[in-house]
Image (spheres, rainbow, N blue to C red):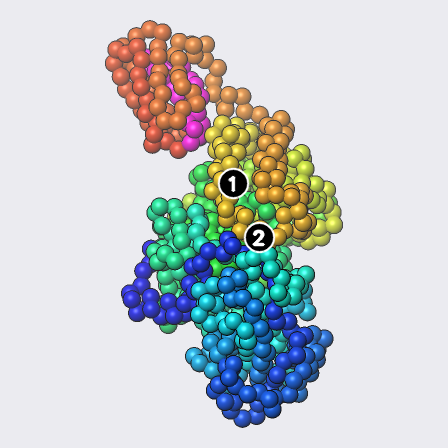
Amino acid sequence: MLLHHSAHFNTLTLLLGFVFCVQTNTYAQIDHWETVVIETDVWSYLVPDAPVDSDWNTLSYDAGTWPTASGGFGYGDGDDNTVLPSGTISVYQRIEFDIVDTSEIDAAALILDFDDGFVAYLNGVEISRVLMDGAGQPDYDQLASGLHEADIYDGDYPAQFTLSKVFLSANLNLGTNVLCIQTHNESAGSSDLSSRPFLFLGINSTSTDYDPVLDWFVPPVFLETSKLPIVIINTIGGASILDEPKVSAFMGIINNESGLNNIADPFNEFYGQIGIEFRGASSGTFPKKAYGLETRLPDSSNYDVSIFDWPSDNDWILYAPYSDKSLIRNVLTYKLGNEMGSYAARTELVELILNGQYVGVYVFMERIKQNPGRVNIDKLEFIDTTENEVTGGYIYKVDRGVVAWTSPFLQASPALVYTKYQMHDPEIEEMHSSQLDYIETYVTDFETALDGPDFDDPVDGYKPYIDLGSFIDFMLVNEMSKNIDGYRISTYLHKARESEGGKLIAGPLWDFNLAWGNSHYCQCGLTTGWKIHFNEICTSAEDLNNPFWWNRFVEDPEFNHQLNCRWQELRATIFHTDSIISFINEMELYLADAADRNFERWPVLGVYLWPNNFIGETYAEEMDYLRTWITDRLIWMDENMFGSCEDLGLAIDSKKNSVHLYPNPTTGKCRLVFNEHIQTGKVEIKNTLGQTLKVVSFVDKASINLNLDQFAPSVYILNVYDEGELISNQKLIRQ
């Protein structure tokens, strides 16, 4: 938790003051919305070549000498009714409008489609500002502090700014009012300029005194309280967020121990400066954007901090579930990954307010990187070029991006392309050439062994190169979720130094928003079939095919045996149908109100979004589909799993019935009852790898109690000895 001293608090309060003004009121009384100002109305406007009177934005100002014309205003590039001269630095606009009854207005929404920066005023009071540095009225020749492209012509939703009832009660007049906009270009030589304003009113009665709203208008959503933590971000100066570089902003997080968060509560989880940018490949085309965050000090240097009691770091992600209408596919996947014993990104469902506007349910999460609390491998420095140091650690991936090297082996048949690898941490431009040579050589040696005639040999084959258990777990999660991107995109792998084990490890798991039945193409919406056969089913995928490894692995009987044993172990515990469905039920209840707000802000229920396999009319239908799909998928995998694992490889024991174990499965405590007293006995508890985890010795007992509270949910082997002789060999399930 990071809390700043009062000076920082006051600074951010000033930056966020409009947000609090907007958000701390009840809007349940709004009956409908109407339009009071539209871009095509006749405006008074001015393209100044000298300073403008400071009272130009007030109702008392006489703008009789200003020209009038229909808006919007700009360079005539297809979205402007009034064309301004090339080289325009700024344009000032005024329009008067009448209010019939102020008591009927509970909110207002200013929408402005603009290029590049602006300040807006209502009756002389500033109501919004983007990319115009400083306070007060900008000078007529001040340039916008950044680039911002207009949105409507490109099919995107324009910027929206909400005015609260408290603000309107103090600043909106009964009768005549004036809305004023000054729009500024980023440079005199800019090729475009645009200003297209709209003003909508939230009416708390059935009266219709103004015009109907436009077809594309989406009423603002107002957040007051939430079960989810509330994240508030304001870019400095209202700067537009870009793909890169990150722009400076302030972020505050409200996360009360009571589990109920109010927009007016103080920030108590985090409060400080960040850098923020867009992130995402295919998801970057969605209107609900995902963001990459970097926590910073006031000098913009990186600042490691613990958020939600997670390990300290400075890189974070606000993932935007959009085509995933369950909102939880990634959350579910990473939960399972962590419970399986490997690192997966920690997640927290939150509601986000960005620059004063509610933008929906997000997943606050960790970015994959080297960190003792994330991917726990040694940091590879540029100077680490010899002996043990050059052997790790590396995080690389199969994905889109800058190619570090290309495999000499074709992808799985029938693909005729080669797998391309990208470096993730360190990035390729930060690496010494000998480091890149090392990791490329190691991975190629693994692929060579896997492709060879003795590939399944425990010494000469592929096994010495990889952590087999991690690859098995990685495969099971991708197959269970039938992840359309599994193996071929967003597939991370890492390698520690030789002194730390040195083998290739599959993972962390990443990017499962299109998994769990959420993709209709290449048969990934079906609950039948194996994703490792993707290339045979989806030959149009071109270079985005699976590497050959996975098909080759299942040609190895030992791999299949361990795969089957691990599947049975997980199905009895972490992958148990009841366990997964119970988590989904909990998330549906937890998200109920937040999901309603999210889908009010993004009305996509009942709408096809690429690549939805199912289109539910309600959130409940989306969750029902997810539950049904997972249940059916688990049944199919039970019936079709590779290999075999009779009783998890336990020996048949004719004396097994002489020892009774109950309850089994257990949630922590269980009891062993013997048919006859055991004079000198011992109980061993082992994991499925044969490692002894606990030994309990006893004398002259007919029964004993076992406490497994400290054991993680899994399958364990229970051996009971009498006078040194093994008399029982059983499977124990800890739920």
Q: Circle 1 sits on which residue?
A: 588
Q: Residue at (57%, 64%) from the top-left corner?
A: 201
Q: In the rendering, at what x and y percent does residue 142 appear?
A: 51, 85
Residue 548 makes an appearance in the image: no
Indicate which disc, 2 or 1, sits on the residue closer to the N terminus: 1
Mark 1 lies on a secondary structure that is helix
In the rendered structure, which segment of residues is drawn in magenta? 713-735
Classed neighbour count for the residue bearing mark 2: other residues with Cα under 10 Å, few (<14), some (14–19), many (≥20)? some
Please name whichever residue, 687 or 163, is drawn nearer the observer in this view of the structure.
163
Q: Looking at the picture, does residue 698 appear above or below residue 116?
A: above
Q: Looking at the picture, does residue 415 appear above or below residue 296?
A: above
Q: Residue at (61%, 83%) from the top-left corner?
A: 44
Q: In the rendering, at what x and y percent does residue 378 appear?
A: 40, 53
Whether the magenta-drawn stretch holds residue 384 is answered as no
Nearer to us of marks 2 and 1 is 2
Mark 2 lies on a secondary structure that is helix
Q: Circle 2 sits on which residue?
A: 600
